[in-house]
Amino acid sequence: MRLLALFAQKLTLATPKHAGNFFRTLAILIWLTPTAWANGYDIYLYELSMPSASQTTWHIGPPRVVAAREGYDNQASFNPESSAVVFASNRDNPKGFNDIYQFDITTGEVVNLTDTPNLSEFSPLWHADELVYVIEQGVPHQSVWLQRDGQQAQRAINSLIPTGYYAKHPQLGTLLWARYAYSLYFEPQGQQADERHFVVNNAGRSIHVIPNTTQFSYLHKQLDGDWVIKAYDPIKQAQQNIIALTGGSEDYAWTHNHWILNMQGNTLRGAHFQGEPLTNWQTLSLLTPPTATHHSPSRLSVSPDNRYLTVVWQRQTNQ
C-alpha cells in the first residue's frame, strides 16, 4: 500500500515528459505480486572515511550484512553512540507485522526492541534514551510513539494527523508527514499540530533534522516535475532551497558535518551545505551491489560519528 500510494502521488505530479514512465512502472507494479515487493529489501553497513588532512578522497569500505534474508528489513538508522543500527523487520512475526530490531556493530548480535504481535512499527530513530518510531494501527490511526527502557510505549506527538514519517528535534518539536495527503505539518514542542501548522504539500518521505541546527530538511516534489531538497526553519517559519535531486533517489541522508548524501543509480554522491543553495553534486564513490541479485540502492543513514553508512538495497526475489 505504501508503494502504490507513492506512485499514485507521482502520477498526479507527472508532466507529459514523465507520464509514460509512470504508466509503465505502474503496470509493472500491478503485475508483480505483493510478496515479491515485500520481501525485496536488505540492509548493508559500510565503513565511511571522509576527506581529511591525510586523505584527499572519500573511501567506502566493503559491505557488511546487517539484515539479508527472505523478508522485510528496511529503514535503518543509528543509535547516538554509533555502536548499533536500528531497523524495521517482520522476521519473527507470523502475521507479517513489523517490529524494531537492533544490530550491534561490534558483535553482530540482533535483538528485538519491540514485540507487538498485532501492530507494525516503522521508521525507528534514537533520541538520547528514547527510541522513537511510527506505529501503524490501521487507517487512520498511524502516529509517532516513543519508548524508554523498561516502560510502556507512549505517544510522542499530540497531533491526530495520520503520520507516516517524521523528524523530531529534541528542543523545538516534530515535523510530520501526513501519509494520505503528502503534506508536512510542524508540531511545536508541547503543542498540537493542526491546519495552522501546515508547512508544505507534495513532500517526499525523506525528512530530517539538519544536524546541529534548528532547521529541518525535506524533499519537495514540485508541480513542474523537479524534486528539490529544501530547508525549513520553524523559528523563522522560512524555507530555502538546498539542492535539486537531478535524477537521484528520493532518499538522502546528512552527515554530522553537513554533507548531504544521495544515490544516483549505484553512485554515492554528496554536496556540502554551508547555508547557501547548492547547484552541483560531487561523485564520492561507486557502490558495487553486494550480490548479483541486489540493485536499486535507496534509503541511506550515517552514524553520528560519521564513521558508518547504511544502504538499503532492493533484492530481486523469485516469482
Image (spheres, rainbow, N blue to C red):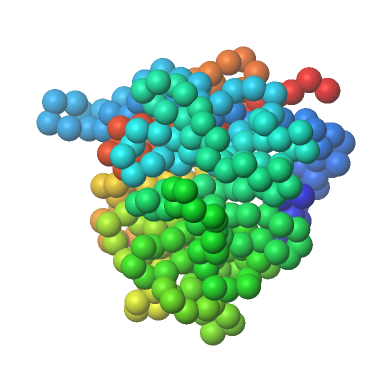
**Residue 281 visible at all:** no
Quadrant (top left/top right/bottom left/bottom right) for the C terminus: top right
Q: Position of residue 61 (x, y in %)?
A: 36, 20
Point out the residue furthest to the top here: 292
Q: Position of residue 105 (x, y in %)?
A: 39, 26
In the foreground, 186 or 284: 186
**Residue 167 visible at all:** yes
In the foreground, 46 or 137: 137
In the foreground, 111 or 226: 111
Q: Is residue 169 left or right of residue 37?
A: left
Q: Position of residue 218 (x, y in %)?
A: 48, 59
Point out the residue furthest to the bottom here: 196
Residue drawn at the location 55% of the way across and 64% of the way down: 155
Eyeballing the image, is 58 above or below 213?
above
Q: Residue 312: name its quadrant.
A: top right
Q: Position of residue 90 (x, y in %)?
A: 67, 35
